[in-house]
Image: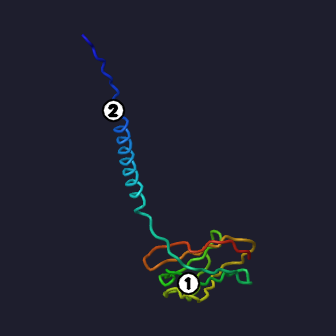
Amino acid sequence: MKVSAKKNDGVSPVIGTILLVAITVVLVAIISAVVMGMTGDIGSSKIVGVQVSPIDDSTSVLVTITGGANAADLTNLSVYAGSTQLGAPTELTGTTVVVGMPYTFTTSALSGSYTVSVVGQFNDGTNQSIYTGTIAF
């Protein structure tokens, strides 16, 4: 009587490769769904060109909106030198910001270098920093 030995190789290499590819595709799909869900609350940035320069009297900054895709949506501007908010010009009260018109923001005497930030308020109610730079007074 002849006894035959059975060879148990397990799953063949082809089926193993197919299973690995399937698991990889499923994992990529799950990770993609999670990552795409995280970006749903990110808003879009506004595009506005701004020119900022100090005025010789060391108490004022001249801000001019030069253009941009969202320049027409600006309703107000705020300017900060460091943590100090500069006084807004009367031309901004109750109107929208006009492209090409220079606005003078004033404060008490400034000396040295300051980080100047211009924050724009848009007609959809959002506020966004549209300029940040260092200016020497």
The image quarter containing residue 49 is bottom right
Colour scheme in use:
rainbow
85, 76: nearer the viewer: 76
Query: Mark 2 highlights which residue?
Result: 11
Residues under labels 2 and 1: Cα distance?
66 Å
The image quarter containing residue 13 is top left
| 8 to the left or right of 63 | left
Q: Quadrant of the C terminus?
A: bottom right
Please, is residue 126 above or below residue 19 in the view? Answer: below
The kind of residue on which mark 1 rests is Gly
Answer few, some or many: residues within 10 Å of disc 2's Cα (few below 14, many 20 plus, some between 14 and 19).
Answer: few
| Label total for image | 2
Question: Secondary structure beneath disc 1?
Answer: strand
Q: Position of residue 66 (x, y in %)?
A: 58, 84
Question: Secondary structure beneath disc 2?
Answer: loop
The dot on residue 67 is 1
Q: Residue furthest top?
A: 1
Answer few, some or many: residues within 10 Å of disc 1's Cα (few below 14, many 20 plus, some between 14 and 19).
Answer: some
The image quarter containing residue 4 is top left
Q: Residue furthest left?
A: 1
| 122 to the left or right of 60 | left
For image coordinates 50% across by 75% down, the residue present is 46
Q: Position of residue 94 (x, y in %)?
A: 48, 87
46, 114: nearer the viewer: 46
The kind of residue on which mark 2 rests is Val
